[in-house]
Structures are given as structure tokens and as C-alpha cells.
Image (cartoon, rainbow, N blue to C red):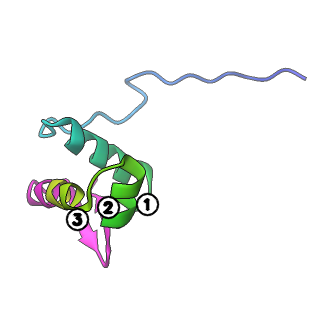
Amino acid sequence: MTAQLTTTTATDRAALPTELNSAQAKLVYLYLDATTGATIREVSDALSMKQMAALSVTKSLSTQGLIEKTGDEYVTVH
């Protein structure tokens, strides 16, 4: 049995929005994009961030229109 290796290139993946300037904003955006949504606690636990830092980043991303809050979860806007 042969295993097939698949690779992706940068053009296969969605590009990060150009508005993302900080490493934390990029991490939070990528995490939310990879999941179907997450709460502040889930973001902070998954990324080893303090909840206040995660809240600050999500507020900034939300203000920029890159994510939105749905119930208790934040999701990326496509």
C-alpha cells in the first residue's frame, strides 16, 4: 500500500488580511479561521494567551471587520 503525500502552496491557502499587523492578531485570526468559531476562553487556552489579551485582540479584529461575535463565539468574516 502506498501513501500519497499532498502538499499545499501559499497560493492554495487563503492569504491573511493585510490589516493584520501584530503576531497575536495573526495567531488569533488563523485560529478562528481554522475552527468554526471559538470563545475567548478557547482562544486564550489554545494560544496560551491571557484572556484579557485575547479579548483585546478580538475587539480589534472585530472593529476592523475581520471577525464577528456570534453568541459567545467569534468567527472570521469571509
Callout 1, which amino acid? Thr
Q: What residue range appears in magenta? A: 59-78
With respect to residue 43, does 13 lie above or below?
A: above
* Residue 1: percent from left, percent from top: 91, 23
Helix, strand or loop at label 2? It is strand
Q: 10 Å neighbourhood of mark 3: few (<14), some, or many (≥20)?
A: some
Q: Is residue 10 left or right of residue 59?
A: right
26 or 56: which is nearer to us?
Answer: 56
Return the disc, 3 or 2, that comes first in the chain's sequence: 3
> In the rendered structure, are the residues bearing label 1 and label 2 in contact, judged by CB atoms less than 8 Å apart?
yes
Return the disc, 3 or 1, that comes first in the chain's sequence: 1
Q: Tell me the residue that label 2 is attached to.
A: 75
* Residue 74: percent from left, percent from top: 30, 65
Q: Is residue 53 left or right of residue 72?
A: left
Q: Is residue 30 visible?
A: yes
Label placed on residue 27: none
Q: Tell me the residue that label 3 is attached to.
A: 68
Q: Quadrant of residue 10?
A: top left
Q: 10 Å neighbourhood of mark 2: few (<14), some, or many (≥20)?
A: many
Q: Quadrant of residue 50?
A: bottom left
What residue do we see at 32% from left, 61% from top?
75
Return the disc, 1 or 2, that comes first in the chain's sequence: 1
What residue do we see at 15% from left, 35% from top?
18
Q: Tell me the residue that label 1 is attached to.
A: 36
